[in-house]
Image (cartoon, rainbow, N blue to C red):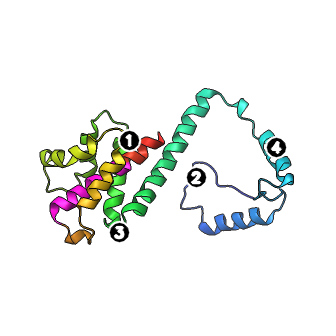
């Protein structure tokens, strides 16, 4: 099996070559299949063998920490849009959900207050709104007691009519966008 040289031009590495390598790897049955039932008595020997083959002690803590942080950050980037889509896709267009998720991922670790983080998340989605006006609408979501952010989000959602995005008033769109941003920030903050 050949592998793509590091630093080579990605356009020269064809999809057909990658598919061929995948098929070859699948057809080479040099390893036992993964035991899907961990309660199976034969599975224990498989897991023991895999643990012994993986030697984390050879890596320094300075090497593991940043790589694991980068890995989990990558997972967060994948999870947040999916989570938002599951919760809000019936009420908010996907493009707006993606935009809010991207902003939330960038600013979740910032030193901004929660209210300002919410505003930063929705300003591009609501270009006609001033920061002061958004600040007023963000207050109930930003200053809810710790642990009650779910109640604040749900309260906002019930206050906004469940109709198509285009049928909502501008204030309803703003409230709904801020609720989406609050949910996204809570998801990202909980994963850190």
Q: Earlier in the sequence, mark 1 or mark 4?
A: 4
What is the distance, in whole Å, between disc 1 and disc 4 at their CAs?
40 Å
Q: Earlier in the sequence, mark 3 or mark 1?
A: 3
Residue 1 highlighted magenta (yes or no): no
**Does the CB distance between marks 3 and 2 fall below 8 Å?**
no
Question: Is disc 1 placed on a helix, strand or loop?
Answer: loop
Chain part drawn in magenta: 169-184
Mark 1 Cα within 10 Å, few/some/many (few <14, many 20+)?
A: few
Mark 4 Cα within 10 Å, few/some/many (few <14, many 20+)?
A: few
Question: Is disc 3 placed on a helix, strand or loop?
Answer: loop
Q: Residue at x 60, y 67 (%)?
A: 15
Circle 2 sits on which residue? 8
2 left or right, relative to 175: right
105 left or right, relative to 115: right
Circle 3 sits on which residue? 90
**Label at residue 73:** none
Given residues 108 and 1, the one toward you in this image is 108
Callout in the foreground (1, 4)? 1
Q: Earlier in the sequence, mark 3 or mark 2?
A: 2
Mark 2 Cα within 10 Å, few/some/many (few <14, many 20+)?
A: few
What is the distance, in whole Å, between disc 3 and disc 1 at their CAs?
26 Å
What is the distance, in whole Å, between disc 2 and disc 4 at their CAs?
37 Å
Given residues 3 and 9, the one toward you in this image is 3
**Label at residue 48:** 4
**Label at residue 147:** 1
């Amino acid at each position: 099996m050949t592998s793509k040289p590091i630093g080579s031009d990605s356009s020269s590495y064809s999809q057909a070559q990658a598919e061929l390598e995948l098929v070859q790897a699948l057809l080479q049955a040099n390893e036992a299949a993964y035991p899907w039932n961990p309660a199976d008595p034969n599975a224990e020997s498989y897991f023991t063998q895999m643990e012994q083959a993986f030697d984390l002690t050879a890596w320094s803590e300075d090497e593991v920490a940043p790589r694991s942080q980068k890995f989990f950050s990558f997972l967060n980037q994948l999870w947040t849009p999916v989570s938002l889509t599951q919760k809000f896709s019936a009420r908010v267009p996907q493009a707006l959900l993606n935009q809010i998720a991207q902003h939330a991922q960038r600013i979740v670790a910032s030193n901004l207050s929660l209210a300002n983080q919410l505003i930063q998340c929705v300003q591009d989605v609501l270009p006609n709104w001033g920061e002061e006006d958004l600040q007023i609408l963000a207050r109930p979501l930003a200053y809810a007691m710790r642990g009650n952010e779910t109640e604040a989000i749900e309260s906002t959602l019930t206050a906004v009519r469940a109709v198509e995005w285009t049928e909502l008033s501008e204030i309803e769109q703003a409230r709904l966008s801020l609720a989406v941003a609050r949910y996204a920030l809570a998801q990202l903050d909980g994963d850190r």
